[in-house]
Amino acid sequence: MQKFTYPSEKFSVARSSLMLPHPRGEAASIASAFHECSLGLHDVRDEDLDNHARGWVAKLRELMDTSGIQDPTGRGMWLIKAEQLSEEEKFELSRIVDELAHWFRREHSRD
């Protein structure tokens, strides 16, 4: 669908951000992926997604949630959140971003 052109592009960039190498460090790459995902999801409504994509988006939003995080030095909430992710959460984030990149690309190509 045409409405998935932008999310497809953003999730492709997010997926690339998570790939090696991480010139500015792993946490900065994850924070960059968070930013791209946020842009990609900005105008996407849950009812536009199938059950799989809705589940991935819900988990992604959970992983990106910065509730309760303090940033007194202004480093960036997503950078701090990225630094706090466990290895398991990093693997899950990578898998979800990859799944959504494929999903949005497939839906976009159905035009």
Image (cartoon, rainbow, N blue to C red):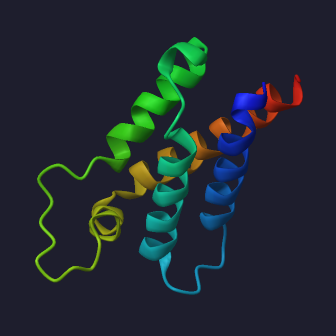
Q: Give left or right: position of 80 versus 60.
A: left
* Residue at figure coordinates x 49%, y 19% from the top left: 46
Q: Is 52 positioned to the left or the right of 82 in the image?
A: right
Locate residue 4 relative to residue 79 in the image: left or right.
right
Q: Position of residue 13 (x, y in %)?
A: 68, 59
Instruction: Residue at 61%, 57% (x, y): give it.
Output: 14
What residue is drawn where x is 48% and y is 23%?
Answer: 55
Q: Is residue 55 above or below residue 37?
A: above
Horizontal arrangement in the rendering, residue 109 relative to residue 45 (left or right): right
For residue 54, above or below residue 17? above
Quadrant holding the N terminus: top right
**x and y percent of residue 15 in the render?**
65, 56
Residue 95 lies in quadrant = top right
Above or below residue 79? Residue 111 is: above
* Residue at far bottom of view: 23
In this rendered view, identify the residue nearer to me: 5 or 71: 5
- What is the count of numbered marks? 0
Residue 96 in the image, given as x and y percentages of width and height: 56, 40
Depth check, front residue: 104 or 94: 104
Give the residue displayed 42% in from the left and 72% down from the top.
Answer: 27
Residue 91 location (% of width, % of height): 51, 51
Quadrant assignment for the C terminus: top right
